[in-house]
Image (tube, rainbow, N blue to C red):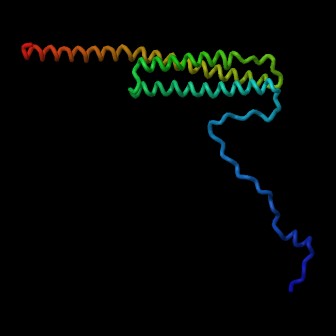
Amino acid sequence: QQPQQPVQQQQQQQAPQLPQQPPQQPQPALQRPQRTQRAYSLQSQEVFQILHRTEVELAGLERAAEEVVLQLDEGTLSCGQARTALANVEARAHRLEADGVDGIYTSDLGSGKAQAKSEKKELLARLERLFSRLEASFQLIKNIDPQKQQQQQQQQQRASGNLAAQRAGHGT
């Protein structure tokens, strides 16, 4: 039998146990930075919730506008369909600007005033970029539309010319 070592020596010989921490979850690349862990007033929290919903809706409008332009380029949407879809996006963006951004008053806020003003400013800048892209898309459609109409007219003229030639050849 081995002589028993004092308890204190046995504890020193064992490797120290570090507390187990759960593995860190990878953060999505496009996740917005979290606000500092600061307690905001209830009024400020409500404003941040509205701003967040507005941001989510704006991202959806940005994607919708991009999708319409892609479908137009691919030929899966006509110029008229694209114009209508983009006009719908534009109307929703104007409503979002009025209700979701301009309708938020930060002057009464205390704890979250600076942060809310900053977020409003960023949303307004994104809305302005969206309006600029929409205007450019409308201009693109305006330029494409006459070309397509001219091509269609030429095709119709050729088709009617061929039909007239066929009739003349058959004596009808």
50 relative to 20, above or below: above
Q: Position of residue 69 (x, y in %)?
A: 46, 24
Screen quadrant of the N terminus? bottom right
Q: Position of residue 61 (x, y in %)?
A: 56, 24
Residue 117 sits in which quadrant? Answer: top right
168 relative to 113, above or below: above
139 relative to 68, above or below: above
Please name the residue shown 38% across and 26% down the image: 75
Please name the residue shown 20% across and 14% down the image: 160
Please name the residue shown 31% across and 14% down the image: 150
Say left or right for 1 vs 76.
Answer: right
Please name the residue shown 65% across and 26% down the image: 55
Q: Nearer the viewer, residue 129 or 82?
A: 82
- Farthest front residue? 172
Q: Nearer the viewer, residue 27 or 97?
A: 97
Q: Position of residue 13 (x, y in %)?
A: 84, 71
Q: How many numbered callouts?
A: 0
Residue 168 sits in which quadrant? Answer: top left
